[in-house]
Amino acid sequence: MVVFMTDVAAFAEWLSREMADRKVNQSQLAAYLGIHPSAVNRWVSKGVIPNPATCARIAEVLHIDPAIVMRHAGHLRAGAILDEMSEEEQRRFALPALRLAEQLLRESRGEAESSS
């Protein structure tokens, strides 16, 4: 698993702010995620970054775009990977991945599949 450099203090502040905006405390988030509250406490006060699967679950629980959570956690570099890819690589790998991410996001939001 590749984790890109991230400011763990910034992630902790961001997650705390997102939780506060939604009036969700650490214990509630832990309960929604089915984990021990000490795990959430480590994210917001101990400089621990949740793994990508947990970030996806956090996004679902807090109704945030998963890419935003992943980016704040340092699991996703916004745009940098595309800059490093050739046009052929983008056609073969990046575009299908983006389409899949869009589909998964629509499904998670309960949106109907568009007819194309």
Image (spheres, rainbow, N blue to C red):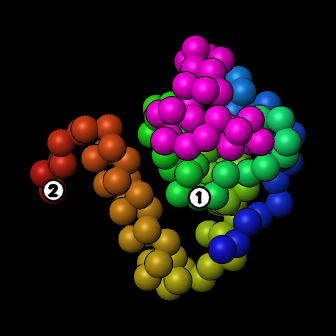
Q: Residues within 10 Å of mark 2 (few under 14, many from 20)?
A: few
**Which residue bears the numbered disc 1?**
52
**Secondary structure beneath disc 2?**
loop
Q: Which mark is residue 4?
A: none
Q: Is residue 53 above or below residue 113?
A: below
Check residue 30 for magenta coloring. yes
Name which residue type carries label 1.
Answer: Pro
Question: 41 or 18: nearer the eye?
Answer: 41
Which x, y percent locates residue 32?
47, 33
Residues drawn in magenta: 20-43
Q: Is 81 on the left-hand or right-hand side of 35? A: right
Q: Is residue 94 above or below residue 50?
A: below
Check residue 57 for magenta coloring. no
Which x, y percent locates residue 113?
18, 48
**Secondary structure beneath disc 1?**
helix
Question: 94 or 16: nearer the eye?
Answer: 16
Q: Residues within 10 Å of mark 1 (few under 14, many from 20)?
A: some
Question: 19 or 97: nearer the eye?
Answer: 19
Residue found 58% across the figure and 14% down from its top: 23
**Which residue bears the numbered disc 2?**
116
Q: Quadrant of residue 3?
A: bottom right
Q: Main secondary structure of the magenta part?
A: helix
Residue found 18% across the figure and 42% down from its top: 112
Residue found 74% across the figure and 51% down from its top: 49
Name which residue type carries label 2.
Answer: Ser
Residue 15 seen: yes
